[in-house]
Image (cartoon, coloured by chain):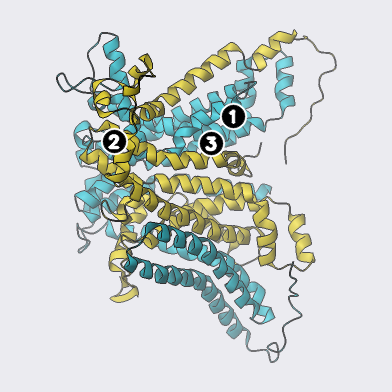
Chain colours: A cyan, B yellow
């Protein structure tokens, strides 16, 4: 390990003490400078590299190769270089500036990619379709009066209640049961977790094979559900046009994907319950259901809450599953809020309305955010 | 911290469980096994359908449901790999696969690097605004991605002006890999910082302090000590971000567009659904191409996934 002796190696520069305010401003400037330097340098490097590659019009293998080298090596090298640069600063300043090298790039990127957009979207949401003139609250009036929007809000409410409920309860029960398998627990869990590796786009193709419907004379029904219906001597059903149940059928896809995540995290929590407690309850004659209800669930309640929150936020943002369905979401009544936003921005070309929908989405998440921060504070207090 | 209130086993057992009974109840009884098997089957059916359909000839796919192959699974006319050849060549899925790689790998590595440094600073460095800044980062966890898309897209295509002055140049990043990498990095950072800080912050402070005593500077401690110790958390986030970016349709659709050289697998898949929605033999093989790599990554790294995600987050 290289040893850098911090305060000793600062010759000169500590001579005449300048006014404290001046130093303070200087240090502040340095902090901002080092915080911004790494991202800007990274960006320029990447920009320069790809300007070059863009002209080549590029063998994909080269692009991928460069991407990895620059992405892995470049970013790290820049941190290293900045850290070295800070070593050159006068000793008094050095250690108060260094943290900003570490934390700065993160803050700069977040400022550009998340903080700026939040502010900007707020502004756009009060403007017209092309973001030219202010229209006051018109867009928000639209959000809460348009019939498709109202339906979308209702549907999304359904999503954020039913999907987490189903995914977390199935995940919890499955995790509890799998915990008792003598063999094959890992395999059993992987099979449930597997859909998480599939994209929403891939998943909806997958589920088309379940829900597919073809009317009489347009070929045989190759969807599994209709296969079963026919096998039972029933008529095939247009599952995805069966209002309002088609919303449920789409939610099933989301549950199918998300249950694995809930199950894995809950399973880890269950395993952290001391065996002695459970064994003791069993020996005292508690039934398996009582053990589950009275001991397991209360012990892992914090984890259940975290997982549920995560699922709620995910369901609130759901878009892909609805968006990739071949049939129109409007006529089928399967619209959801996030999908409306994309539709208004990219296909119906109304920036203001799209932004207003985004603001409403954000507002819906604020309570979760407040709660999250509170929880963090409590955790800090314990630490 | 851990609630290992070690309870001594009761001395006089009130009701000695007959060997089999507790065993059957506590460990896998028939009820448990059957439930598990039923759920596994339910959860596997959709994927199995895709896999089977993707290997069946077009005529067969349209004539009968995929489950009918089980009637005569070894008949040669039931199977083909032609679908994959068509999807890779004509469907452009070969190219899209490489594009997905070019998008996904840097979009995973860049945020992890940045987040690891930030997480270290939030955990082990003293600086003004540490707490407030971290709370802001966690708060950003819940900004809906959708909200960020429009402003970023305008930033990419028009730059930004404030009071008539250009504060951000028009870099025409729209449709470039660089644009989407940075976007994914930005969107992934809050979760990455949150997870990694949870983990890095829970490392024993004695290790870090003794390294400081020995004169190691922060950079050395970070690189030689903290990063190797944090492999589970880093691996967990790698899987998370990799799967997310690879499977993402929205960001790719917005920043790389629906057509053109740079479109990724999910976008290509969506186009295929739109243009050839009834060509099941192609759709399924394309879908399976898009699933292949995530499945490999997932199975290779899954043991880290659980360990890294739950460390710090789950306090028993």
Kindly check if marks 2 and 1 are in contact, taking CB atoms under 8 A apart as contact: no
* Residue at horizontal 22 percent and vertical 27 percent from the top: A241
* Residue at horizontal 33 percent and vertical 47 percent from the top: A360
Residue A338 visible in the shown view? no
Q: Do marks 3 and 1 both belong to one polypeptide chain?
A: yes
Residue B204 x %, y %: 73, 52
Query: Which one is nearer the viewer's eye here, A314 or B42?
Result: B42
Mark 2 nearby-residue class (10 Å; few <14, some 14–19, many ≥20): many
* Residue at horizontal 65 percent and vertical 13 percent from the top: B25
Q: CA distance from mark 2 to mark 1?
A: 33 Å
Q: CA distance from mark 3 to mark 1?
A: 24 Å
Instruction: State the residue position of label 2.
Output: B282
Q: Nearer the viewer, mark 3 or mark 1?
A: 1
Residue A227 x %, y %: 29, 17
Which label sits on residue A305? 3
Residue at the far front: name it.
Answer: B76
Residue A350 x %, y %: 21, 53
Q: Do marks 2 and 1 both belong to one polypeptide chain?
A: no
Instruction: State the residue position of label 1.
Output: A186
Depicted B60 relative to depicted A232: above or below: below
N-terminal label among 3 and 1: 1
């Amino acid at each position: 390990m290289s040893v850098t002796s911090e305060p000793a190696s600062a010759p000169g520069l500590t001579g005449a003490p300048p006014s404290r305010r001046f130093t303070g401003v200087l240090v502040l400037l340095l902090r901002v400078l080092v915080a911004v330097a790494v991202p800007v340098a990274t960006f320029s490097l990447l920009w320069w590299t790809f300007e070059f590659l863009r002209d080549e019009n590029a063998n994909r293998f080269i692009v991928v190769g460069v991407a990895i080298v620059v992405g892995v090596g470049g970013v790290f090298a820049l941190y290293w270089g900045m850290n070295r640069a800070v070593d050159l600063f006068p000793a008094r300043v050095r250690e108060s500036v260094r943290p900003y090298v570490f934390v700065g790039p993160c803050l700069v990127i977040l400022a550009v990619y998340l903080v700026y957009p939040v502010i900007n979207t707020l502004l756009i949401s009060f403007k017209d379709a092309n973001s030219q003139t202010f229209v006051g609250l018109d867009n928000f009036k639209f959000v809460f009066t348009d019939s498709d929007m109202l339906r979308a809000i209702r549907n999304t409410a359904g999503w954020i209640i039913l999907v987490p409920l189903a995914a977390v309860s199935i995940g919890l029960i499955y995790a509890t049961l799998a915990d008792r398998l003598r063999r094959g627990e890992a395999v059993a869990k992987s099979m449930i977790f597997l859909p998480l590796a599939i994209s929403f786009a891939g998943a909806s193709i997958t589920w088309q094979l379940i829900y597919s419907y073809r009317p009489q004379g347009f070929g045989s029904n190759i969807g599994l559900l209709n296969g079963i219906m026919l096998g039972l001597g029933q008529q095939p059903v247009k599952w995805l046009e069966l209002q309002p149940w088609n919303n449920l059928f789409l939610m099933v896809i989301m549950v199918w994907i998300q249950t694995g995540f809930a199950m894995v995290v809950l399973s880890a929590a269950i395993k952290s319950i001391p065996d002695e407690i459970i064994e003791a309850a069993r020996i005292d004659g508690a039934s398996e259901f009582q053990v589950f209800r009275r001991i397991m669930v209360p012990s892992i309640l914090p984890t259940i809450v975290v997982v549920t929150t995560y699922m709620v936020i995910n369901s609130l943002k759901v878009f892909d599953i609805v968006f990739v369905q071949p049939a129109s979401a409007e006529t089928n009544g399967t619209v959801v809020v996030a999908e409306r936003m994309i539709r208004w921005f990219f296909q119906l070309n109304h920036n203001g309305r799209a932004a207003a929908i985004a603001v409403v989405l954000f507002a819906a998440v604020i309570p979760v955010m407040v709660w999250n921060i509170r929880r963090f504070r409590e955790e800090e207090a314990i630490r | 911290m851990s609630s290992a209130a070690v309870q001594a086993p009761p001395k006089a057992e009130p009701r000695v469980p007959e060997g089999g009974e507790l065993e059957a109840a506590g460990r896998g009884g028939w009820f448990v096994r059957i439930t598990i098997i039923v759920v596994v089957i339910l959860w596997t059916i959709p994927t199995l359908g895709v896999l089977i359909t993707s290997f069946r000839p077009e005529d067969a796919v349209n004539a009968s449901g995929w489950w009918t192959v089980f009637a005569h699974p070894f008949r040669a006319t039931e199977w083909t790999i032609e679908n994959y050849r068509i999807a890779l060549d004509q469907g452009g899925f070969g190219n899209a696969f490489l594009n997905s790689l070019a998008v996904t790998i840097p979009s995973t590595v860049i945020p992890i690097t940045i987040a690891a440094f930030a997480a270290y600073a939030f955990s082990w460095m003293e600086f003004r605004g540490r707490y407030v800044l971290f709370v802001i980062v966690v708060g950003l966890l819940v900004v809906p991605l959708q909200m960020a898309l429009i402003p970023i897209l305008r930033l990419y295509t028009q730059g930004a002006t404030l009071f008539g002055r250009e504060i951000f140049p028009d870099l025409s990043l729209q449709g470039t890999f660089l644009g989407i990498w940075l976007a994914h990095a930005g969107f992934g950072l809050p979760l990455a910082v949150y997870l990694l800080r949870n983990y890095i912050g829970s490392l024993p402070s004695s290790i870090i302090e003794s390294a400081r005593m020995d004169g190691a500077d922060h950079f050395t401690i970070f690189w030689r000590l903290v990063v190797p110790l944090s492999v589970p958390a880093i691996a967990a986030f790698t899987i998370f971000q990799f799967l997310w970016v690879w499977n993402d349709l929205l960001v790719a659709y917005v920043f790389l567009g629906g057509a053109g050289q740079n479109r990724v697998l999910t976008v290509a898949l969506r186009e295929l659904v739109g243009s050839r929605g009834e060509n099941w033999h192609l759709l399924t093989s394309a879908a399976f191409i898009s699933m292949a790599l995530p499945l490999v990554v997932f199975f290779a790294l899954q043991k880290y996934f659980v360990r890294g995600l739950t460390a710090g987050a789950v306090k028993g």
